Image (cartoon, grey):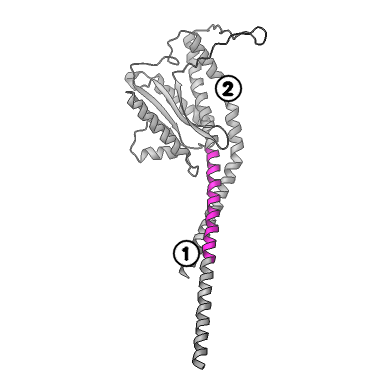
Amino acid sequence: MGSQLALKSRIHSTESLEKIFNAQEMIASSHIAKARDVALNAKPYTDAIFDAVQALVAHTHITHPIAVKDENNPRVAVLALTSDRGMAGPYTSSIIRETESLLARLEAEGKQPELFVYGRRGSTYYKYRNRDVAATWEGDTDQPGVEIAETISKTLMDAYMKPAEKGGVSELYIVYTEFINMVVQKVRVLRMLPVEIVENEAKVPDPENEPAADVSPLYAFEPSLEEVLDAILPKYIQSRIHECLLTAAASETASRQNAMHTATDNARNLVDDLTRKLNASRQASITQELTEIIGSADALNTKEE
């Protein structure tokens, strides 16, 4: 009897968990379409400003901080984008694992990484491990707004533009999760500053089938190159951080939906398994009672004879 009560209690608690998991899955399902669309809509602007900055760096000889790092400054900044809430499967743990790998790699190169963390889960992880964190931000990791992107970009830009003797950094890295589709989300490490040049393979024009190869543009800067780049730099940093926040939010929502779907299925399977065990226990108990009754009746008949 005690075993049956324990099984009934486990079935009841598991059914309650199943309802919670199913509700979380439905909430994530209702949010994922919007999060995906917002992330995709922000990408064209970010790509355009990145292409413009890269073209400037590639086709002009400049010594602006946007393109040239201070080789004598070993300090670098690393921003990890984690989540505020759990129940998202390996989302945060994957970010933390990749961040730890990046920090170890930078330290092996003789650099001094400075850690910045967005998300309550990441902040708590490093807090309880007594890891020095330069700055943390929390709130709405699944629906980040422009305000948080402005705050983070201002902090990182100040750290990047600050002189080395005052604690400035020479490089900026972001560790985030890129949204590929509903099933696949990949952890990425992006070096945001200085801008990395991606060389394109030279094209050989074919007059009959293809148009002539693209000609490198010529630039005229007004009022000056430095002032133009000074104006572009904060917009570039903010747009890249905002895009990373949005695609990370879409990834977090998708990861939570997948995790809650799996948890719901596991809870249902567990309820079915416990129900079978309960039924088997009931049958065994009934069989034992019937055996005892029949045995008692046979004993009484034997005495009467």
Q: Front-most of 2 and 303?
A: 303
Q: Is residue 56 above or below residue 249?
A: above
Residue drawn at point x = 57 percent, y = 25 percent: 43
Examine the rendering and report whether any part of residue 137 can be seen.
Answer: no
Q: Earlier in the sequence, mark 2 or mark 1?
A: 1
Q: Which residue is mark 1?
A: 6
Q: Where does the magenta region start and end?
A: 252-279
Q: Which mark is residue 45?
A: 2
Q: Which mark is residue 221?
A: none
Question: Magenta segment: does it hold 263?
Answer: yes
Examine the rendering and report whether any part of residue 96 can be seen.
Answer: yes
Q: Front-most of 41 and 257?
A: 257
Residue drawn at point x = 48 percent, y = 18 percent: 233
Between marks 2 and 1 in the image, the one whose residue lies nearer the viewer: 1
- Amino acid type at mark 1: Ala
The residues tagged by marks 2 and 1 sit, at their Cα atoms, a distance apart of 58 Å
Q: Position of residue 283 (x, y in %)?
A: 54, 70
Q: Position of residue 207 (x, y in %)?
A: 65, 6
Residue drawn at point x = 53 percent, y = 40 percent: 255
Q: Is residue 250 above or below residue 8?
A: above
Graded by Cα atoms within 10 Å as few (under 14), some (14 to 19) or many (20 or more), the crowding at tag 2 reads few
